[in-house]
Image (tube, coloured by chain):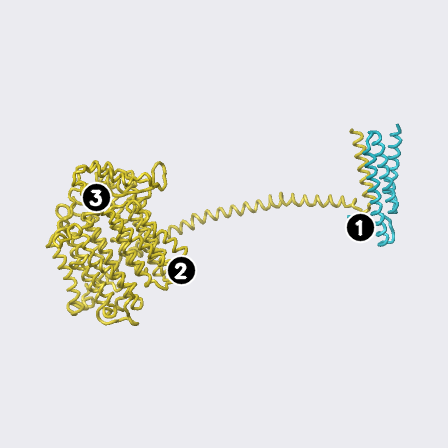
Amino acid sequence: MLVNQFLILGAVLFCTGVYGVLARRNAVMVLMSIELMLNAVNINLLTFGLVVGSISGQVFALFTIAIAAAEVGVGLALVLLIYRNRSNIDVEELDLMHG
Amino acid sequence: MLENAYIIPLLPGLSFLAILLFGKRIKGGQGAHYIGVPVLAVVWVLSLIAVFGWINRVDDVTPAEEAGVTTTEIAGSSVGTAGDPSSPVVLAAEGEGEAGVEAGGHEAFAEPVTRSATWWSNAGENFRVGTLVDGLSVTLLFVVSTVALLVHIYSIEYVRGDERYTHYYAFLSFFSAAMLFFVLSQNIIQMIVGWELVGVSSFVLIGHWWESLDNSNAAMKAFMTNRVGDVGLLVGMIILYFAAGSFEVPVINEMAASGQIRHLLLLVAAGSLTAAVMSKSGQFPLHTWLPDAMAGPTPVSALIHAATMVVAGVYMVARLYPVFYEGYSIGTSSINGLALLGGFTAFMAAALAFVQWDIKKVLAYSTISQLGYMVMALGVGAWTAAIFHLFTHALFKACLFLGAGSVSHASHHTFDMREMGGLRKVMPHTYKTFVLASLALAGVFPLAGFWSKDEILVGAMRGQQNGYPLMLFFGLLVAFMTAAYMTRVIWYTFWGEYRGHGTPHESPALITGPLWILAGGAVLGGLVNLPSAVADKIGLGGAAHLIETYAEPVRYLDQFSTFSVAAPSLGLALTGLALALGGILAVYLYYWRQLGPHGLTEQNVWARRGYTFLVNKYYLDHLYTGIIARGVRGPVAQAAYWFNQNVIDRIVNLVGDSARETGRWVYTNIDQGVVDGTVNGLSSGAEATGEGLRVIQSGRVQQYGSLLFGAAAVLAIIFTIVI
C-alpha cells in the first residue's frame, strides 16, 4: 500500500508549509505556505478516506479547497490593504499587538 | 332583639369605621353626622325594642307561675328559646337550668338572655364574647342610646365648623359602641375590654382640642388617673375568676350569692373593684380627673362625663352586686366601705361645687356628688334606688350640661359664670330647661330627682336592721347642698346683669330640641319607678315602677334575707323636700334679697381659710402632683441617674473600650497582616507573572505561530508516546 508514501508526502508538504509560515517575511509567501499546509492536510484526508473506504475524506478535501480559496481571497485583500498603508508587506514589522 | 342584642353595639362600631373612611368626603368634612345620627337613631329604636322585649319576657314568666306551672318548666322553656340550634353562634345558658330547678321554691323570675361565641381558647379555658340581656342591661341600653342620640344631634350645631368634625363624630360613635358593648358584657373579660375602650374614647374626646396644652394635659390626667383604678379592676377580676372558676357574670354572681366563695376572697375582690369604681366613677380620692375632663367639648361632657361613662363603675357594682353584697357584708353591718365612700364623696364634692366659677366644673362636682349618691345607695343595699337614680341623673345632668353648652355657645364661648348673667331674657328655652333640670337635680317634688333621691334616703334609713344613720345624714346634707349650689349657678348665669361681652342670643333648634327632650325626661323620669303607694293613688299601678318590677335581679336579691324594697316614708320624703327647698330658699335670700352675711370671707379668717381650702380642692391635686408624683419622681430619678452613671455607663464604657481594643488588634494583625498581605501578594504575584509573560507578547505573528506549532508538536509527541 502506498499509504505511508502519501502520509510522508503530506508530512513533508506540511513541514514545508510550516517553515514557510514561520520563516518567510513576505506576507504573500506566508499565504502560499498556508496553502501548502492545507494541501498537505488534503492529501492526508484523501489517504485516510482511501484506507477506510469512505467518501467522507474526499468530501472534506473539497470543503477545504473551497474554504482555502475564500481564505486566500481575504488574505490577499488584507495584504493589499497592508501594502497600501505601509508600502511594504514584511510580516516582521506587523507587531502592533505586542504587549 | 334580646338574642340579637349584639347588633346594638355593632352598629355604632360600623358607623365609626364608616365615618373614619368616608366622613371626610361628605360635604367637605362637615357632614359626618349624616352617618352618625341615623345610625344612633336606629340604635335607639333597637334599644327600645330590647326594653319592651325584656318587659314582655318578665311578664310572660310571672303570670305563668301564678297559673301553677312549675318554675322548672319555665326555666327550661326559656333556655330552649335561647338555645335555638339553627343559630350559628353557640348560645350559652350555663347554670340557668339548674338554678331554675334549685330555685323551685322561690318566686319565678325571668332568666337573662345570654348568647355568646368563643373568642379564643387557651389551656382548656374558653374565653367567650357575647351579650347578657337582663333588666339592668336594657335600662342602661336605653339611657346610653337616648343620651348618645341627643348628643349626636346637639353636636351638629355645637361642633359645626370644627376642623376635626369628622374625627369628633367618629369617636362619638366609637364611644357609643364601646359603652353599649360594656353594658351588654356577658363575662368579666368583656367588661374589662369595654371599660378600657370607653376610657380610650374619653381620653380622645377630652383632648379633642389638643392644640391647647391644658386640654391635652386634662386628657392625660383622666387617662392616668383611670389607669390607677384599672389596676384594681384587673386584680379584682382575676380574684373573681380564680374564686369562681369562670369568667361568666351569671356564674360568678350565683356562686357569690350562694356562699360558695369564701368571704375573705369576696372582700378583697370587692375592695379591688372599688378602686376601679373610684377612678371611673369619680369617687374620692380619685375623682380629680373628672372636673379637668370638662376641657373636652360640652356635648362630650354631657354624654361621657355625666350620663354614661362615669356610671360605668356604678353599673359594674350593680352587675356584680352579690360580690359586693357578700364582700362588704351589706345588710349585716351598720357601716361599710362602699356606703362610706359614696356618702363621703357626695358630701365633699357638693362642698367643692360652691366655690367653682366655671359652670361646667360646678356641674362636674355635682356629677361626682350624685355618683357618690348612687354608690352610697348600692352600699346601703338599695340596688333599685341606685339604678333609678342613675337613670334620672343621666337625663337631668345631660340636660344641665347641654344647657351649659348652649349658654357658652351663645355668650362668646366662655364657661366662666362671672362673664354671664341676665341670660334668662335672651335665652328663654335654655333658661327654662336649665331650671327644670336643676329642680330635678335638687330633688323638688314632683320632678324625677325627688323620687330617686327619696328612694336612696329610704334605703339608707331602712337598710339592714338598724339603718345607716351616718349615710342618712350625708344624704340629707347633700340634698340641701345640691339645691343650694344649683340655685347659685342659676343666679350667676341667668339673673342679674349681663357681665360678658358680645351679644348673647338663644341657640338654634338643634340645641334647644335636645334640651327640651331631656328636660321632659327630667320632669317625667320619676314615673319609671314611683313608690307603689303613690303609683296606686294616681292610677298608674304597675306601669309606674318599671325598674323595681323588671330590672331588679330578683334571683340574687331574694337570697339576701334582709333585702327588700324599702317601704317609702312620708316623713323622710317631706324632710328631704324641705331641705331641698330650704337650700333653694337660703341661696335665694342670699343672692336675690342680699340677705345674710356677705363678704364673710373678707371678714372672718376661718371662713377665708375654709374657702381657700375648697378653692384648692382639698389640695388633692397638690398631693398627687406635688407630693406623690414629685416625691416618687425625685428619689427615683436620682437613683435612676446614679444607676445610669455608675452601672449602665460603666458597662457601656467597658464594652466600648474592649471593642476598641479588639478592633485595633484586628486592624494591625488580621486586617493589615493577613488580609492586606494576601491581597497584596496576589496582586504582586499577578504583576510579576504579567511581566514575565509580557516578553512573549511580541506582536509578531510568526513568533506566535512558532509557539503554536511548537506546542502542537510537543503535544503530538506526547500523544504519540502515551498512546
Rendered yellow, the chain in question is B
| Residue A87 to residue B419: above or below | above
Marks 3/1: CA–CA distance: 115 Å
Rendered cyan, the chain in question is A
Do we see residue B289 in this rendering?
A: no
Outermost left residue:
B571
For the image, the number of numbered tags is 3
Pointer 1 chain? A
Front residue of this view, candidates B329 and B646: B329
Mark 1 residue element: loop
Of the residues shown, which amino acid type is indicated by label 1? Leu
Q: Residue at x 41, y 62 (%)?
A: B28
Do we see residue B229 in this rendering?
A: yes
Marks 2/1: CA–CA distance: 81 Å
| Residue B3 to residue B495: above or below | above
Pointer 2 chain? B
User: What is the crowding at mark 3: few (fewer than 14 residues within 10 Å), some, or many (at least 20)?
Assistant: some
Report if the CB atoms under discs 2 and 1 are less than 8 Å apart: no
Mark 2 residue element: helix
Of the residues shown, which amino acid type is indicated by label 3? Asp
Q: Which residue lies under the disc numbered 1? A: A96
**Viewed as shown, does residue B94 lie left or right of A25?**
left
Which circle marks residue B26 in the picture? 2
Tell me the quarter of the image containing the C terminus of chain B: top right
| Residue B98 to residue B384: above or below | above
User: What is the crowding at mark 1: few (fewer than 14 residues within 10 Å), some, or many (at least 20)?
Assistant: few
Marks 3/2: CA–CA distance: 47 Å
Front residue of this view, candidates B179 and B534: B534
Which circle marks residue B60 in the picture? 3
Which mark is in front, 3 or 2?
3
